Amino acid sequence: MSLALLLDSLLSLLLPDRCAGCGRLGALLCDECRHRLVVYDEALPRVADQLTGVRIAYVFEGPLRHALHQLKYRRRRRVARPLGTLMASHLHTHPLPCDALIPVPLHQKRLKERGFNQAELLAREVARATGFPLVVGPLVRIRATRQQALLGVAERIENVADAFVWKGPAPPARIVLVDDVLTTGATVNACAAALRAGGAREVYALALARSRGHMP
Ligand SMILES: [Zn+2]
């Protein structure tokens, strides 16, 4: 166990949880923030030609935006627990055929900087709640790509093309990729291309959130 994780665990024993959405004491994600979550019902991205299907749970705004910020940039790993549970609930009501959950990998360099992969933490919670197997390792990000947030759609596709490769025996037939935020879908689509090249038959993407008003 890393020192950061050990400290996080010790602090959680000593201090009450603080809501990652609004900051009040009591729970990692309070009931009020849960009620403010907005189900995503807008158009899905069209970029994703390698994907069999895409599921997005919530609109990326309000308490969810705050909570993901706490997880990724304030490095509050435990926030992955309620967020991953929300993704598992979404999967429960909108089922997908799944032989394995695979988180979108970070490049080694980014992983070292952050200390963890938020998509992997979320996927672990989804696996725990659903019983689907988690596969981490063989899907590798071989290129350090630029931040997608700074790029337009065409640039995003180009930026992540061939950034991923499957290094292992044939992957399971039906895979659900897990990521925190999906924007154009270029990243999950590039992962799906690598999985298909490795032999996967159906590849779905499950994301916690997407901003409103993106072009499909
Ligand atoms: Zn709250």
Image (cartoon, rainbow, N blue to C red):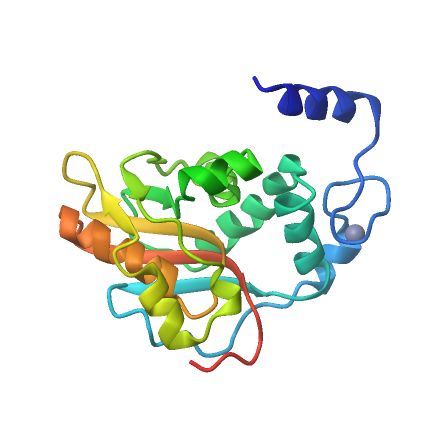
Quadrant of the drawing holding the N terminus: top right
Q: Position of residue 138 (x, y in %)?
A: 27, 36
- Taking depth in this image into account, of 11 and 155 the one nearest to the observer is 155
Q: Position of residue 136 (x, y in %)?
A: 35, 35
What residue is drawn where x is 46% and y is 52%?
A: 179
Query: Can residue 18 be seen here?
Result: yes
- Taking depth in this image into account, of 151 and 80 the one nearest to the observer is 151
Left or right, residue 152 beside residue 64? left
How many numbered marks are there? 0
Left or right, residue 62 beside residue 166? right
What residue is drawn where x is 22% and y is 52%?
A: 194
- Taking depth in this image into account, of 185 and 98 the one nearest to the observer is 185
- Taking depth in this image into account, of 192 and 31 the one nearest to the observer is 192
Q: Position of residue 196 (x, y in %)?
A: 18, 54
What residue is drawn where x is 51% and y is 43%?
A: 122
Query: Can residue 120 be seen here?
Result: no
Quadrant of the drawing holding the C terminus: bottom left
In the displayed structure, 150 sits above or below 120; it is below
Q: Position of residue 173 (x, y in %)?
A: 18, 47
In the displayed structure, 2 sits above or below 164; it is above
What residue is drawn where x is 66% and y is 58%?
A: 64
